Image (tube, rainbow, N blue to C red):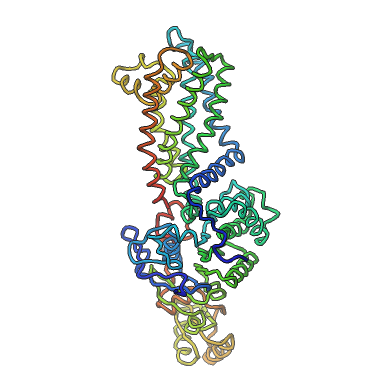
Amino acid sequence: MASPGAALDRRIPFSAIRDTKAVVQRNLIHYVRVPQLLVFSTIQPIIFVLMFRFVFGGSIDTGPIPYVDYLMPGIFLQTVVFGSLATAIGLATDLKSGLMERFHALPMWTPAVLAGRTIADLTRNVFVVVLMMIVGFLVGWRIHTDVLGVLAGTALLLLFGYAMSWIFATVGLWVKDPETAQAAAFPVLAPLVFASAAFVPVANMPGWLQPWARNQPVSVTADAVRALTIGGPSGSLVLKSILWSVLILAIFAPIAVRLYRKAV
Amino acid sequence: MTDLAIRTQALVKRYGDLVALGGVDLEVERGTIFGLLGPNGAGKTTAVRILSTILKPDGGRAEVLGKDVVDDAAAVRRRIGLAGQNAAVDPNLTGRENLRMVGILGQMAGDRVEPRAAELLDRFDLTDAADRPLRTYSGGMRRRLDVAASLVTRPPVLFLDEPTTGLDLTSRNALWEMIDQLVSEGTTVLLTTQYLEEADRLARRIAVVDGGRVIANDAPEMLKSQLGSTVAELRFGQEGQAARAMELLAGNVSGRVELEDKTVRITAEGGAHILVEVLRILDADGLEPEGLAVREPSLDDVFIALTGHHAENPEEHERPDAAVGRRGRGA
């Protein structure tokens, strides 16, 4: 047997990427081994698509724009925002299982646990957004711009979903329990997703709600994706959405890393 | 160069008002097994968490192989392995994937990870289950994989926090042999346990901890000589009878005699022949115990011998809820 410690590799500069990759892989394996995680996070938005497209849609006035074209960007947003809850649940589960304890005692790049978690959830978002686009096509959603617009819109959605993952990383590390994380999420998610332009135009909301509903990140991003898929001026909306995502990341990533260091 | 693998000085950890460690001094020689023996809540897990850099102490200092656990945590992490009470493994990964992940995160060279994982799976008799997700493993298999995971990087210092709690006898014996073998290869092991038998079987030195303090620190033989090697318990129908038996036996048999409710406990050196003596004395007085048990001394006996009271088990028992328990005092 080799002398103790001999197998250690000291190429630490590489470890940030290598460690993060290992954690990403581990989290993605979960989605393969426990497909329910993925199935349930896609069933809900599909139900929303059917409900809003065929039940409520007829009563919602979006002017000259077909409601389904208005709706789908909102659905994409809802999907990535609700999906970010998985970040909270995943981290809280690892805390509870004792796995975090092992991570803390390993000579790894510390933020890799969080980076790996959020990047895995970003990867899942790519899959889920593409799936929802296919569902959209099936119920009549059409792109009125070009491939570039769709790609830009998708990138914007994914960036926002990634930022949301860090909010929920913070929630998960803070409450330390998967069930509590789930319960804690709704009060955060409801005003973001429902008091927004995701499903209905802001113009029909009460005046006091409109400033929030018009400028909050979900609305701004949904409107930006609309502009990119339906047409019309998109520049300032895209910029606002990026600013929101960057702001969220700048606030929550350091908090989450700090909570992680003290988590066990 | 010091021959100590682990050294703590006046180590203190508090959780609010609760003192989990109240100034603990430990010295563990390289290449030996050191047993930390105590009941739940004594501070064993807290000590292990500080030594494995998971937790920062509130006072005092701790070194592993000469590296400070706070100032030089990264260096400590490169030299230790940790297996906890809760099998800290990923239930959705296979055994092999778990070991692979620990190898990579333990900064092993890429080409050495795979052979090492295979070697450990073989050594812990998990080769057949290697490519099954862990959630299909039995408790004993999980525990073995947890210990295997702590060994992936061949750490010179190994922390085993109650490694055999919840294991069946066969698995326990296999693990004991494994630990012996590791030490014969030069590894230093710090082991926590609630079982005197386990500490006695494995450790060269035992520190008994109670309420965050070390109340004894000695070789197992020395502890046991304090204790006696046989405990006989005589249970009587009435307290009066027990008191009378106590009176008759105290001073007349070679050993320590204690009375508790209706039970008289005799702790003696040198085996069961003490019983002959005891029963003769009782019989002469017409006293007949209702029940009789002879056993090896337990942790509780150690506590009674050392502190005069039972091993306290304040509120927290078997860490029913890890997330909350983790925040709490740790066992």
Whole-percent x and y of residue B160? 52, 64
User: How many numbered badges does the structure rendering display?
Assistant: 0
What residue is rendered at 44% in x and 71% in y? B311
Q: Is residue B88 above or below residue B172?
A: above
Q: At 49% from the left edge and 32% from the top edge, which residue is drawn? A: A83
Residue A55 lies, in percent from the top left, at 51, 15
Q: Is residue B246 visible?
A: yes
Residue extending furthest top? A64
Observer-nearest of B310 and A173: A173
Q: Quadrant of the N terminus of chain B?
A: bottom left
Is residue A160 positioned above or below B74 on the image? above
Q: Residue at x 43, y 21 (%)?
A: A222
Residue closest to the eye, A168 or A105: A105
Residue B323 located left or right of residue B202: left
Residue B199, image x, y percentages? 53, 73
Q: Quadrant of the C terminus of chain B?
A: bottom left
Q: Nearer the viewer, residue A161 or B251?
A: A161
Return the x and y of residue B165 as percentages of the image width and height.
55, 63
